[in-house]
Amino acid sequence: MRAVDHINVDVDDLEASYAFYRDVLDLEVRRPPSDFKGEHAMFQVGETVVTLAETGRADGWDERGLAHPLDKAHLAFETDREEYEALMDELNGQFPNQGPYDWDEFEGFYFLDPDGNLLEVITYEPPTGERERPLLTHDDVE
């Protein structure tokens, strides 16, 4: 294998999820929903395509079903420190133990999209000043 070519994400509400991935995550639109006969949208993230497919089979998780982010499969997006901090500020408070997490080489923060799919944003860049939030590790969460 050389790379991950594409990832499909089940969503129940394509319109809401499309806006979230486009506007909040700022992913590059490769093909909008209007390009498809079915309910799909495609984004380009580096060399990987993320496709949203309105299947009615989204996970639908919320704060009640998520004791620890590593209890569930997820997609992780890498970004710079500035965007990472902005997303933490915007998406904080969705469920306990969202992070940030110290994963040795990088720092990660977990959040849910509009359909309850678990996502993570990571950065390899250290903070520029004093850390505003304490870092968690896997062992910090019961």
Image: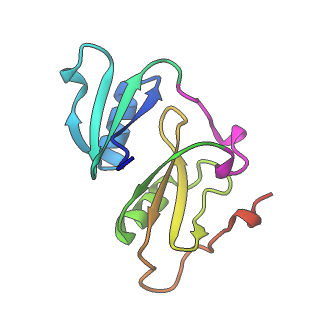
- Range of magenta residues: 58-71
The extreme front residue here reads 1
Q: Give coordinates of residue 56: x percent, y percent.
A: 49, 18
In the rendered image, is residue 111 in sight? yes
Q: How many marks?
A: 0
Instruction: Judge whether residue 66 is colored magenta.
Output: yes
In the rendered image, is residue 89 in sight? no
Closest to the observer, 115 or 44? 44
Instruction: Judge whether residue 12 is colored magenta.
Output: no
Q: Give coordinates of residue 49: x percent, y percent.
A: 30, 40
The extreme bottom residue here reads 129
Query: On the picture, is 18 further left or further right than 65?
Result: left
Q: Give coordinates of residue 138: x percent, y percent.
A: 70, 63
The extreme top residue here reads 37
Query: On the picture, is 76 further left or further right than 39?
Result: right
The residue shown at (64%, 50%) is 69
The residue shown at (36%, 62%) is 79
The residue shown at (41%, 83%) is 128
Task: Work out whether 10 lies above or below 26.
Answer: above
Q: Give coordinates of residue 61: x percent, y percent.
A: 62, 34
Closest to the observer, 53 or 86? 53
Screen quadrant of the C terminus: bottom right
Query: On the picture, is 141 further left or further right than 41?
Result: right
Closest to the observer, 130 or 42? 42
The residue shown at (41%, 75%) is 125
Colour scheme shown: rainbow
The extreme right residue here reads 142
Task: Work out whether 44 lies above or below 91.
Answer: above
Query: On the picture, is 114 further left or further right than 1?
Result: right
